[in-house]
Amino acid sequence: MIRIAPSILSADFSKLAFELKKVEAAGADLIHVDIMDGHFVPNITIGPVVVKYIRKATSLPLDVHLMIENPAKYIDAFVKAGSDMITVHIETVTIKELAAIAKGLKKSRVKLGISLNPGTPLAKIIKALPLVDFVLVMSVNPGFGGQDFIPSALNKIRSLRLIFKKDIAVDGGINNFTAKLVVGAGASVLAAGSYIFGAKNTRKAINSLRKAPRR
Ligand code: DX5
Ligand code: ZN
């Protein structure tokens, strides 16, 4: 089963509750929430204060993608705000820090994901794999919505699929065409921002991503 996670980075933030209801009604499985600090990535978005209200505005699980330096410092705040899944970047943590984060999240029953940038080799996350519930493969350099899919993500997904049995999520440049490629390579969760929020028919857009044939 392919799960679709609309990224609210491409939503109209002045009417977030409406946007959340819209994708929920159109069949979204998760809400992908992009947290950016202006340090790890060249853009700034929202923090736990806003996530708390997003939590109240939807019943879908919140998939919180931390693109921030020193994520360990902020994990508790994002758990309290109502995250169901939290992803940290391998570029921002040591294995020791990740193990501590994993321990804390297990207690809170929040799923942990590890993400890696397009320029980070798969070898960098090998030690992290036993600690996490899923991997989020970046198929754009994080920071902005609406960028083009970077094809080298496909080989990464294929190689990872051979050694990792849990969910592989993909984030960046996902549309009806690239969805088929990443699902064919072994991905099971698709985060998509501009393709879903830019669509005239939200339900059609979500269905077209979900229909990507499984490998
Ligand atoms: C990129 C974010 C993505 C982004 C995807 O830094 O992590 O989640 O919202 O946007 P699209 O689907 O437009 O590439
Ligand atoms: Zn994201």
Image (tube, grey):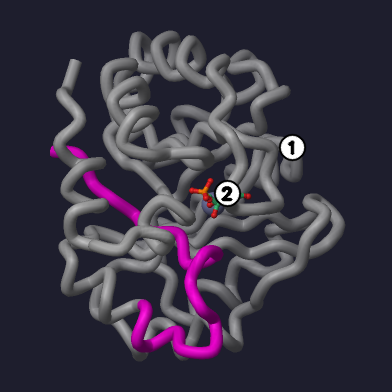
Point 23% across, 46% down: residue: 3
Residue interval drawn in magenta: 1-19
Instruction: Residue 189 in the image: state x and y as whole percent.
Output: 31, 41
Question: In this picture, is 38 found above or below 58?
Answer: above
Residue 23 appears at what percent x and percent y?
27, 69
Q: Is residue 103 left or right of residue 167?
A: right
Q: Is residue 63 visible?
A: no
Relative to 44, 48 lies left or right: left
Query: Closer to the N terminus: mark 1 or mark 2?
Result: 1
Q: Which residue is mark 2?
A: 146
Q: Is residue 66 left or right of residue 184?
A: right
Q: Residue at x 30, y 20 (%)?
A: 186
| Snapshot quadrant of residue 188 | top left
| Amino acid at dot 2 | Gly
Quadrant housing residue 161? top left
Q: In the shown orientation, is residue 168 left or right of residue 97?
A: left
Residue lying farthest to the front in this orientation: 200
Q: Is residue 180 above or below residue 42?
A: above
Q: What residue is shown with label 1? A: 91
Residue 68 within the magenta-colored segment of the rendering: no
Q: Is mark 2 within 8 Å of ligand 1?
A: yes
